[in-house]
Image: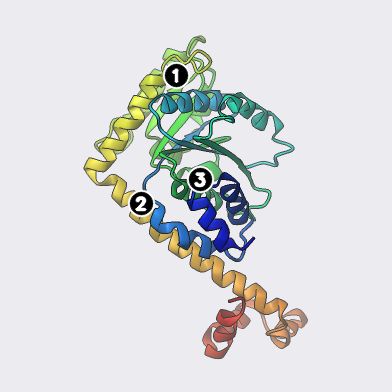
Amino acid sequence: MRTTELVERMLAGNRFALAKLITLVENRHPDTALVLSAVHQRCGHAYVIGITGPPGAGKSTLVDRLVAALRAQQHSVGIIAVDPSSPFSGGAVLGDRIRMQSHYLDDQVFIRSLSTRGTHGGLARATRNVAQLLDAFGKDFILVETVGVGQTELDVMGVADTTIVVLVPEAGDTIQTMKAGLLEIADAFVVNKADREGALRIRTELEMMLQLRPATGWKVPVLLTEATTGKGVAELLDAVLQHRQFSRTSGGSDAHRAAARQEEFIEVLQEEISRRLEASLENGHFTGLLQQIKRGEIDPYKAALRMMADEESLRVVLRTGQ
């Protein structure tokens, strides 16, 4: 089936076409840019909520409860479960997502797991693209759940309009080693499993750390939840909606999305040039230059600069793969 037909079917509400297009963009199909351009005018409605934190913090259960709360308000929801590890070695994490199975039969909820397998190192980009497809499909809210608190998660969370960092009472070491970047991107902290000893202490430590954060006009809340029972979930959703309103009235939302569009333009341009360069090399262009590089007759840096200075070489690269 042609990608144009898949896009038409997806925009008409076909879930199978949506799933096929997600696979297409996740695997960086050559038509990825054309697909995303075709759906661009239908994007901009959905609100993206990012949820991150260490394994075992109860994120999947919390996501499940947030979805239930959003569905109770008649919102359509998309879920992107991001696993930076292999889907095989990360079995415990993906296993937790079985807890979302109560939503699988709900046609207003669409769930998709992403892993580095198939994304060729562009997990944040793939996540953004999948969110765009879900947005164009008509979802009101998109929840992005990631597995940990490393650099990958910081990158992925750049996709979110509101970022929630989930910790547990035993996460004292995590807080001490928490990257400054994570502290800065968090729009809300959640201490989950708050019925355990130490929850109030962790909340106090977080509130003290947040006092060192530069003032932005938004006071980052530190909330206590018990996801297994649903306690505190309504308050968390209220905090998300308050942050959405704050971002809109302060102009932060527009600035965030403008910066994201610029970043995306640069990423698309880099990816397209890289793809066309690879196609040029596969088609046998620049064989002589490559042989010189392999024999050590010219260093790779000088060769690259020579190509960049040669307009005809650049035309060959840009024409290839169109």
Q: Where does label 3 land, which residue?
A: 156
- Cα separation between marks 1 and 2: 32 Å
Question: What residue is drawn where x is 26% and y is 42%?
Answer: 248
| Amino acid type assigned to the residue bearing label 1 in the image | Ile
Which image quarter is the C terminus in? Answer: bottom right
Amino acid type shown at disc 2: Arg
Question: Closest to the observer: 161 or 30?
Answer: 30
Q: Residue at x 58, y 56 (%)?
A: 25
Q: Pointer 2 and pointer 3: residues touching (CB < 8 Å)?
A: no
Q: Is residue 24 left or right of residue 256?
A: right
Q: Secondary structure at mark 3?
A: helix
Q: Is residue 211 visible from the viewing direction of this image?
A: yes
* Mark 2 element type: helix
Looking at the rendered image, the disc whose residue lies closer to the viewer, 2 or 3, is 2
Q: Position of residue 226 (x, y in %)?
A: 48, 15
- For label 1, the residue is 202
| Amino acid at pointer 3 | Val
Residue underneath mark 2? 257
x and y percent of residue 321 in the render?
Answer: 61, 76
Is 122 displayed left or right of 78 in the figure?
right
- Judging depth in this view, the residue of 284 and 55 nearest the camera is 284
In the rendered image, the vertical position of residue 274 relative to residue 137, given as above or below: below
